[in-house]
Structure formats: structure tokens, C-alpha cells
Image: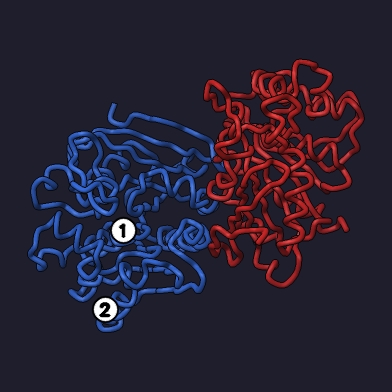
Chain colours: A blue, B red
Amino acid sequence: MTLEEISRTRCFDGQQLRFRHRSGTLGCDMQFSVYLPPQASRAKVPAIWFLSGLTCTDENVMTKAGAQRYAAEQGVALIAPDTSPRGEDVPDDPDGAWDFGLGAGFYVNATQEPWSTHYRMYDYIQDELTTLIAEELPINPLRAGLMGHSMGGHGALVIGLRNPEKWASLSAFAPIVAPSQCPWGEKALGHYLGDDRDAWKAWDATELVRAGAAQKPLRIDQGEDDNFLAEQLKTPLFEHACADTGYEASIHYHPGYDHSYYFIATFIGEHIAFHAAHLRGSD
Amino acid sequence: MTLEEISRTRCFDGQQLRFRHRSGTLGCDMQFSVYLPPQASRAKVPAIWFLSGLTCTDENVMTKAGAQRYAAEQGVALIAPDTSPRGEDVPDDPDGAWDFGLGAGFYVNATQEPWSTHYRMYDYIQDELTTLIAEELPINPLRAGLMGHSMGGHGALVIGLRNPEKWASLSAFAPIVAPSQCPWGEKALGHYLGDDRDAWKAWDATELVRAGAAQKPLRIDQGEDDNFLAEQLKTPLFEHACADTGYEASIHYHPGYDHSYYFIATFIGEHIAFHAAHLRGSD
């Protein structure tokens, strides 16, 4: 069996599911979570993918964001992949730091040893997992939106901007918009991709916009009391790239909100409605 | 300072708060969580208390139930106490079991050593914490509803049925309705209260209804695929007591739903609306 079902729980008249499968791309077993709205019992539904942040697994957004209510209302599935390859064979940060290695795949294809064998989260999300889900679940692969949080916001923007034909709409909560210009990103890209900073540009949303990425519906929400805003997230770098190139992005700052799931929970209903509006008309 | 603020996070335009305080009733430091809706910045608001189940702390419902959206819409606060006394001096299950001791106070006043020194969760909820919150936070103590899950559903029903003048409305998700007649309850009441089963009756919602508890608005939701329904929760025992005594309770069974927070999240909006309707008219 291609997909092993780990759990199935009823939620808002739909199904909260968790699966395990063997990933050829990553060379390890992986888990992911899916919420199928009630409409999926009758027909294939559009899906919104949520890429999570540092230290998370596929479970965080499903248990903490309160997203299923909105997905059920809009008739869209939610898909949450894990944030890195997993398993005893998969190398981790040698110092055990939480911002690199396990739980911190940064959604790139690593080119440097020892990371390049397993750390290929870009290909995993963009190709292997989307194909597997289209084959095995009642989800329409031609109607897909992509969102994420923090490191996963970086992942959503990069994967979406590089593949505008596949993703109808993009959004992010508190994304790392310019990994080439912040400590988290410099550490990760340096290890996964090597010291040549030119090789980083294809994995940096701000650089992708400056290089002429195709226009897509794109929304970002950022809390003004987010402790990571100034040093790591640097939303204004993306805003400036959009302004300089004429890229239309809807960027919202929120006084008083921080980096937590309480922030995500507050605005995820608007994000799901944003994606659903674009997904309804996209095939 | 009576209340030490541990954290403050903006959520749905209100405030998600966590506090620490010294409990004289329990003889230890305690933590609890509060969600204040945006309306609380202008006036005192009604509150719904949520008592959690075995192994939980004050944090589970705040992070996993998706409740803040509904509380903000209805203009009610949410208050989540911890589930037992805490600290090195507090005795725990001698075998380290999760269904008794720490995280499993069962909302009773223990009469047996070594439990009676600290395990007084009934007095803590009913008197000490309600008084403290009325003094320190913008919450109207005359408009209070009480709900809970599993062991906390038991707690909500018992505390509410014993104190109808204080709690305007009662509700429970998958409550232990008859602790005198299930393994979890028999273990807990036997240790906390001793072997005399007559002493258990004041701590058993089914017995309280049979003894003529005053009518209050009361709602219960129960998943039919809940693994604990047959052996531990035994909802029909409460239904029969209501039928026999003419107590009007609104009891809803839901096919396919289990004991998890996915079940709570699905129906907590209806519970909050149920309480809010009664709290608006109650003073």
C-alpha cells in the first residue's frame, strides 16, 4: 500500500487524517496530515497546502490553528507536510540546534554533503507528495493554493513563485522573506547549498521577485510585536522588491500580534477565504 | 502582587493571558489561562469557565479548541484552570498512572491522607479562583457559565449542579457523568474520599440529579465513536436520571466523533453560543 493511514478523526463533518509513506525523494519514511472537508465525500475538492515553521511537524497547524472550520465552510482540503526528512539515517545539526537539520529543511534541495542525500524538501513538496496525493485522495491537483508560516512562509513563497503554473494563490504568515539576509537563512542555505551566494538566489523569495517572478495572488500577514521581525523575517525587504518591480502583493501588518499560533488562528480564516476565492475559478 | 502575568498574546483582537498565583486553598503555586475578548477593554464581560480532562493543564483548551474566535464574537471571556494542584510537595499516583494525582484532581475536596492537604480543587474553582479573578480581571462574576471535557465535564456538572446560584449555564463534552460507576471515578473517589460510597454521591452528577438538583440550562455533547463512552463516560446513566426526575438536559450524540479536541473544536462554537445566550440575560 502506497499510503498507510495512521489516524482518522471526524472534525467539522469532515475527516482529519494522518498518513505515513515511503519517500523516494527523501530516502526515508514520512508522515503528513490532511483535513478533508465534508464536500470531499462527493467530489474532488481544491486543496490549500500549509508549510510549517522551524521545529514543527505536520501536526502543529492541524491541532493549533483552528483551520478546519473554515476549510469545511469553503469546501477545501488542507494538507500539511512535515518540515524535514526524518529518521535515524538523516543527519541533524551537529550541535543539536533547532534552527537547522531535523525540523528545519527550509524547503530546498540540498547540494552539499552530508545533506544532499535526504534534504530535498523542494522536490518532495513540489513533485512527489503532490503526485501521491492526487493519486490517492479526493483532491483536485489543478486547484492548489500554498501557504506557510515563518520558515514555511519562505517555503510557500519560494515554491509558489518558482512554479506559478501549479499554485493558484500564495500566502504566508510571518514569512522569512529573504533568507539570504538573515541569520536563520544564512546558516541553512550555507550548509544546504554551500558558500556561493549566487546559488542561494533561487531559494529567496525577495530575489525571485527581483528576478521577475510571474504575478500571482499573494498575501502576507505579519505581527508587529513578532520578536523575529527585525532580525529574521524582514518583511520590508520583500515589500521593497515588490515596489521596485511592480509586483502586486497584499501585505498586512497587525499591531500587537506576535509569532505564535494565536496570530495564525486569528487570520487563517481570511487566508483560507483568499485562497478559496482563487481556487474556485482556476480550472 | 496577587497575580503574576506569565504571558500576554494578542488573539482575535483580544488578549490571551496566562497567570501564576499562590493558592492558599491548594497550598501550592498554580497557573491558569484566560482569554479576554476585545469587549473587555471597555467593560466587564461575562465568562465561561472550561475545566479540562485527565493529563491536561490550563493550556490545552486555549491552544487546541479554536475557541477564541467564538468568545470574541460573543464578547465573553474564557477561563481555564489547571486540573490538579502542582509542585514537588504535592503527592502523585504512587505508580505514576495518568488517571490519578497530578493532572487528575477530579474537582473534589479530598478527605483522605495524603491527598487532603493539597487536593481541594472544588474549593479552588468554586471559591478561591472565582474570587481572585473577580477582583483582578475585567470579568463580571455575576455572569458565569461552566463547561468541561471528560473529567472536566464531570467537574463542570458537579460544581454547577451543587451551586446553581453561581453558574448560569452548564455544558460538557464527553463528561464522566457517573464517577461512582466507572473505573476512573472509582479509583479517584476511593483514594480522595475513602471507601464509604455514600460520601461519593455529592461528587457524582448522576446522583446529584437523582437527589433533586435545581434545574439549570444544561447541554452535553458526546461522540458515538469515543473509545471511553461504554466503560468510563456512560452518558446514558445521566440521561436515565434526567428522564426519571424530569430534569431537562439537552444531550446530543454525534456519529463518528471521538474523544479528541477535534470533537471539541467542532462543537465548542455551539457551546459558547449556548452559554452566551444565558449569560446575557442573567443579571
Q: Quadrant of residue B38?
A: bottom right
Single out the residue that lies furthest toward the bottom: A244
Within 10 angstroms of label 2, few (less than 14), some, or many (20 or more) residues? some
Which residue lies at the image location 31% right of the left edge and 31% below the top edge? A3
Q: Is residue B230 visible?
A: no
Q: Quadrant of residue B60?
A: top right
A87 on left or right of B44:
left
- Out of B229 and B123, give the one closest to the viewer: B123
- Residue bearing the label numbered 2: A241
Residue A150, percent from left and from top: 35, 60
Locate the N terminus of chain B and report the quarter of the image it occupies.
bottom right
Which residue lies at the image location 83% right of the left edge and 48% below the top edge? B168
Q: Quadrant of residue A204?
A: bottom left
Please tell me whether residue B218 is drawn above or below residue A199 in the rendered image: above
Residue B251, percent from left and from top: 75, 34
Chain bearing tag 1 is A
> Mark 1 or mark 2, which is nearer to you?
1
Q: Amino acid at mark 1?
A: Met
